[in-house]
Amino acid sequence: MFLTWAEFDEAPEALQEGVRHITEEVVPAIKGAEGLIAGYWAVDRENGKRMGVLIWKDADAPGAVMPGVSAKIKAQREAAGRGTQPGPDRTGRYEVVAKV
């Protein structure tokens, strides 16, 4: 298993839009994706941060899935008249070595 993570630093006014983006665009676009075991998104409202963690069956799954997910999100945003959502400030990938 592998996990990927993305972290966002945002101004307070952008934070709520980021949360809306996750719940209304990202989650529906990625739900049921091949190779995705779980996804978690969290927000630190006091410090203006968001984080997403996705757990994958193998290292190849994100590369196979994410282009299609991104295309779905882009089409939905364009249809709603929204601009491009800013990308993450930091990202990473880790191999999972233990689980409880």
Image (tube, grey):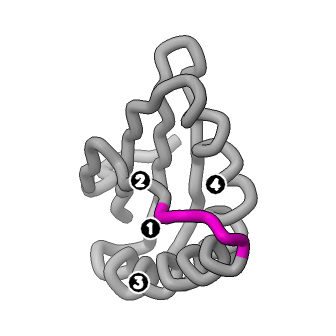
Find residue 60 and report its horizontal and vertical position in percent: 30, 81
* Residue with the mark numbered 3: 67
Q: Which of 99 and 19 is in front in this view?
A: 19
Residue 76 appears left or right of 63: right
- Quadrant that contains the N terminus: bottom left
Q: Contact, CB < 8 Å: mark 2 with mark 3?
A: no
Tell which of 71 and 59 is nearer to you: 71
Q: For residue 21, which numbered disc appears in the image? A: 4
> Which amino acid, mark 1?
Trp
Percent coordinates x, y for residue 71 in the rendering? 50, 84
What is the crowding at mark 3: few (fewer than 14 residues within 10 Å), some, or many (at least 20)? few
Q: In this view, does 7 lie to the left or right of 70?
A: left
Q: Name the residue under label 2.
A: 86
Identify the residue shown where x is 40% and y is 39%: 8
Please name which of the two marks, 1 or 2, marks the residue nearer to the observer: 2
Q: Name the residue under label 1.
A: 56
Q: Which of 74 and 7 is in front in this view?
A: 74
Question: Which contiguous range is marked in magenta?
Answer: 80-84
Question: Where residue 96 sits: x, y (%)?
Answer: 33, 53
